[in-house]
Image: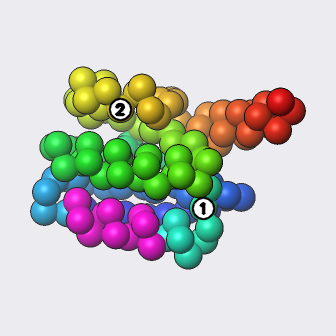
Amino acid sequence: MQIEFEMTDEILIVNLEGELDHHYAAVIREEIDKTVDAFHSKHLIFNFEKVTFMDSSGIGVVMGRYNKISQLGGKLMITGCSEYIDRILYMAGIYTIATRTKDVTESIERIGSEVIEEEAN
């Protein structure tokens, strides 16, 4: 499992590659949390474009990061899912707490528009 981070404004983009299973979940969790804290990220985008396998521990990674980001008042977006990953996330109910988008660009745009809308209210 490889993880790469990108930062834009207050948005941390997490690009994952490989298998997200119990062997790597703890490391991924720690790396994301450290990076969120270090860069004061408010929003998080999970890019699953290069993830080939995910088990229930991957769902735990997403749920835990949702809890962290929501405490900061941020948004969680998920993008780049294969049909297999998409089905797992859907069955786990992840899309009730996170927004699914077609790509990273759409995720960034949606976060921006939702933040503007919230500020207007």
- Report the label total: 2
Q: Which residue does the image show at 60% across and 47% down from the upper left? A: 74
Q: Position of residue 111 (x, y in %)?
A: 66, 39
Binning the other alpha carbons within 10 Å of mark 2 as few (below 14), some (14 to 19) or many (20 upward) gives: some
Examine the rendered structure and indicate whether residue 33 appears above or below residue 71.
below
Name the foreground residue: 113 vs 82. Answer: 113
- Name the side, left or right, on which 104 lies relative to 55: right
Q: Secondary structure at mark 2?
A: helix
Q: Which mark is residue 76?
A: none
Binning the other alpha carbons within 10 Å of mark 1 as few (below 14), some (14 to 19) or many (20 upward) gives: many
User: In which image quadrant can residue 114 be found?
Assistant: top right
Q: Position of residue 40 (x, y in %)?
A: 62, 67
Distance between mark 1 and mark 2 Cα atoms: 21 Å
Name the foreground residue: 72 vs 95. Answer: 72
Q: Is residue 83 visible?
A: no
Circle 2 residue:
94
Q: Which mark is residue 41?
A: 1
Q: Position of residue 61 (x, y in %)?
A: 30, 52
Q: Which residue does the image show at 56% across and 58% down from the upper left? A: 12
- The amino acid on which the numbered mark 2 sits, given as a three-letter code, is Ile
Span highlighted in magenta in the image: 25-34
- The amino acid on which the numbered mark 1 sits, given as a three-letter code, is Ser
- First-in-chain label (1 vs 2): 1
Q: Which residue does the image show at 83% across and 30% down from the upper left? A: 121
Q: Is residue 14 visible?
A: yes
Figure quadrant of the N terminus: bottom left
Q: Position of residue 81 (x, y in %)?
A: 36, 35
- Name the side, left or right, on which 82 lies relative to 11: left
Name the foreground residue: 97 vs 28. Answer: 97
